[in-house]
Amino acid sequence: MNYQHLIEKIYQEVKPSIGKGKVANYIPALERVDINSFGFAMRTKSGEEYFIGEALKPFSAQSISKLLTLVLCLNNDDTIFDSKVGIEPSGNAFNSLVQLEYENGIPRNPFINAGALVITDILLSQYTNPEDEILFFARELAQNHGIDYNIEVRNSEKETGFRNAALVNFMKSYGNIHNNVERVLDCYFTHCSLEMSCLDLVRAFSFLANNGTHSNGQHVLSYRQNKKVNSLLLTCGTYDAVGKFAYKVGLPAKSGVGGGIIAVIPNEMTLAVWSPGLDKSGNSVVGSLFLELFTTYTGKSIF
């Protein structure tokens, strides 16, 4: 299949929709992002890469960093789903407080904010300086030592992150947070400010399309762990729109309110798209459409 020709064709189809949706204006530093930005990259299991638009331009990963921190955490502790974090879709907004009280401070899954805060807390117990470990891990996987945090974005989130502060304090009251609350929040806001390009993302997460083995030969996850992570991406990775995303796109994926989506076709390829205009659930409008057309035209989905 001529993938470059295909992605150029899809780009022309989605081009009229670029600019639709809204940027994540509740984070002041992201409010200034150009809503007309667009990039796409893909990497096959055999190492072929194709891209279009601003695929090499770094953008705010936001919740995509939750996938990175989960994988890093699983490298050290394979029991986190036994008692600390659930594995079910939330059905509520990513920053919702509602379910935590009913479920005794145990977040539904690691990709909503509450779950990612618990994962961050675990990393703080595993590492002296998890921010450095997360950054090193991202650079190593993406094979790009220029990847870094955006301190302006981190500070912007920290200044307006009242809901996240409520979440972590609430879970602390249930004994599901073990480190200092402010330290957990600081680490969380920092890793959410990570900036990566579409090309960085498909390279970094190439192991998800290869049973846990990175394209550089590194065994990032076991086959069993990799299967579980991909299943969580399908059922929990796109906020409270996972059913709609599975119905239309049919791939495990993780989105972020920076406008990025990383998606996986198991045993075949990784895909990443960036377009900052978001729908009501916080997923990229054009990114979702691009992936839907990609799976439609190629006939490649997990269904």
Image (cartoon, helix red, strand yellow):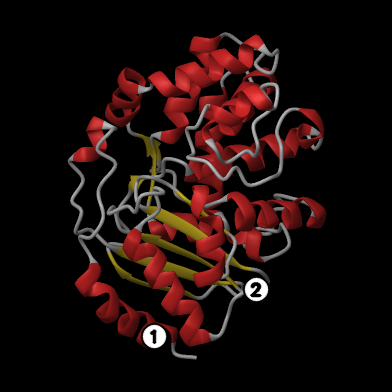
Please name the amino acid that badge 1 sits on. Leu
Mark nearer the N terminus (1 vs 2): 1
Which residue is painted at 31% across and 81% down in the image? 8
Q: Is residue 61 left or right of residue 21?
A: right
Establish if 90 lies above or below 217: above
Please name the amino acid that badge 2 sits on. Ile
Quadrant showing the C terminus:
bottom right
* Quarter holding residue 84: top right
Q: Residue 61: x percent and y percent?
A: 41, 44
Q: Is residue 100 left or right of residue 228?
A: left
- Marks 1/2 in contact by CB < 8 Å: the verdict is no
Which residue is painted at 46% across and 86% down in the image? 297
Separation of residues labelled 1 and 2 (CA atoms)? 20 Å
Q: Is residue 249 visible?
A: no
Residue on which the image places disc 1: 6
Q: Is residue 300 left or right of residue 231?
A: left
> What secondary structure is found at the residue carrying circle 1?
helix
> What secondary structure is found at the residue carrying circle 2?
loop
